[in-house]
Amino acid sequence: MMVAPAVHGAEGDRLPEATWDEGGAAAALAEQVERFAEEFSAVVAELWALRKRESWSNPERAMASRLRDSFDSMLRSLGSFGFFVLDQAGRITHATGQSEKLFGLPVAALTGKPLSSFVQVSGDRCIDMELQDLLAGMAGRVDRLPVQARSGPHAQLILHALRGDHPSPEAMYCLLRPADPSEIERPVQHMLLADVFAGSNDAWMVVDGMRRILAVNTGFTAVTGYEPFEVIGKTPKVIGSGRHDAGYYARLSEALDTTGEWQGEICNRRRNGELYEEWLHISAYRDGAGRTCGYVALFYDLVFARKAYERIDYLVHTDALTKLPNRALFLDRLAQAVKRGREAGRPFGILAFDIDHFSEINDTLGHDAGDRVLSVVAASLDRLADERMMVARLGGDEFVVLAEDGEVGSLEGLAAQLRGLLELPVLQEGRDIHVTLSGGIAYFPAHGEDASALLRNAEIAVDMARERGGDTTQIYQDEFSRRRLERFSLASAMRHALERRQFSLVYQPQVDSVTRAVTGVEALLRWRLPEQGEVSPAQFIPIAEETGLIVQIGAWVLEQACRQQAEWVRQGLRPIRMAVNIAGRQLREPGFCSMVAAIVERCGIAPRLLEIEVTESELMGEVDQAARVLVQLAAMGVGIAVDDFGTGHSSLARLHALSVDRLKVDRSFVLAMGEGGKGAAIPRAILALAESLGLASVAEGVETEAQASLLQEWGCGEMQGYLFSRPVPAAQIAALLR
């Protein structure tokens, strides 16, 4: 047995539940109706006979009373069914009180009117035609005929009808009951629409031409709280809030009737009584003839939509790691600040800064350590910044502060405070990380009259601070832009320098400290531009390292130097050592050792005649990886020299592990020797260290005989400098070797 959902009347009172079997419902219900109809017909016939009598005797009055009691008892037993008696014209002559709840009208309003005034049959046929067939004997009875109510809380009803057995005006007996959703035969358009919208996350509702709900989806239930069986067959008024007047709905209906579409905000009520604002869009759908079949309503909760928008806006404009405003939000606020500053004639400034050597923190300690540093810096900034300042993370290790309402000099004070706060190391997994910052300040309008120029110039000032060693703050100057433009131009030109053959090599001799005979040369790179002439290595080498071009350029230098070495040997000249500078970026390049081996083999030189020079700072920064590479080079027979020794932070244990052959005393220490005291102590200590470790030594930048004599006295094996020769072309080195 299947239990039909409880049906509610127009005033909300609950009708008794009816039960019926899906398969035998028609027969059982017809039998019940027929039995009631027979009793009712008999009662009506007796009452009709009594009405024709002008006077009743006491026995007749008693009989009439009993008949009325029987009639009332029988009608009460009909429960949730609406029972009607129709005459031969299809007009209602009698109706039960339950009928009021089916149509929302009093019995008096039903009596005397055709049943077709209150219900209609789907399709081309009308209710009058169905009943006329029954009255004419063309049908014995009408079973389970789906009809649509023209009014009342139930859109779909089921009609059962029998022809009367007595020749009286009461020709037909009809029973109407609310339809179970499973009994409703929906038009194809309705079913297709319901299927299309069933899985949608949005809230959808399909209504028929009489604006009764035919289908809803899970989105509807999620928003309103109503299950489908609670609203199907009812009008959308079931979710109405009562906050809109009749004129509002009249305008809505008028728009649907004239244009077939309406959209706007509307207040509705959830099942739990809670009011909510929604955005509603209603569109009519039509059949092949262009007739309106019904409407599709799409709506969504504006409260939820606003919260979702706020969340999306937060995610779009907030840095996920530091929870600070991101670049997009900062640029928007900066543009607004520029507009206000221009209108009010009020200057303001921005402080941009990067974390010094941040990439090294990421590369050596991992991204967790990098994220920890970023979070600490962001928290420190947020704590120090005035409430009128805006702090943002632009990306990577770039931060910026907008000080619109504060004093112009407040940014310099903030930078100093932040630097002081970060003097304490950041602790990450038991390891201390020392953090320093390079900052740049730009002021409106002196350093930029729009947001883009202002931020660009602050970042240029950051670059200048980094060039000066970092851990400092620079205020923008026009000279900075000129230098940055030069750097950009050089970087662009450098990308084509190899193919245009603008690079060349010169060689500076290294001589024996005692005999002054040439023992080796250092290959040095030179770059000549057609219009500008010679470009200083101090200018272009750092740019090559920053851009990564040093890898390609360094490989070219190594091959050219080895080719020149092979050429000198071919000319029968005395074999000497060829020293080639290698950047740390090259050491980290996969396959570096294989490349060196291939060049040595291709040029046909002895590996012992090649010496790789790496600066002390590069070796100590990547000591583990450098050790692996240098060990492989040493195994090939290639010599290893530590350049600029004494300027870095070498560990003797690490130095010993690097398979080093030679230490080169930096020219700055050689130049300081004339000062005596400490100036002489450093190179002397380096030479003593080299001797104790069994390493060869070379002093760079020797320019006077006095320097050469002291170095020789302290045990320096070889020297290099202008005292012996400037860097010269290969032909001049050949002359020295003959």
Image: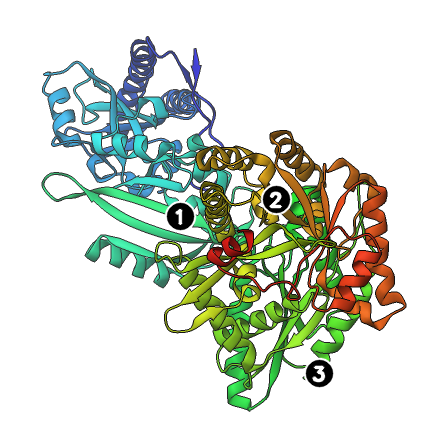
Q: Quadrant of the N terminus?
A: top left
Q: Amino acid at mark 1?
A: Phe
- Percent x, y of residue 369: 71, 45
The residue carrying pointer 1 sits among few (fewer than 14), some (14 to 19) or many (20 or more) residues within 10 Å by Cα, namely: many
- Percent x, y of residue 440: 63, 72
| Sooner in the amino-acid sequence: mark 3 or mark 2 | 3
Q: Is residue 530 above or below residue 106?
A: below
Q: Amino acid at mark 2?
A: Ile
Instruction: Determine whether, in the image, residue 220 is placed left or right of residue 295.
Output: right
Q: Quadrant of residue 668?
A: bottom right
In the drawing, what numbered circle is on residue 409?
Answer: 3
- In the image shown, does 335 or 641 lie closer to the viewer? 641
Mark 1 or mark 2, whichever is nearer to me? 2
Q: Quadrant of residue 514?
A: bottom right
The residue carrying pointer 2 sits among few (fewer than 14), some (14 to 19) or many (20 or more) residues within 10 Å by Cα, namely: many
Q: Which residue is mark 2?
A: 612
Instruction: Determine whether, in the image, residue 98 is placed left or right of residue 42.
Output: right
- Percent x, y of residue 297: 33, 45
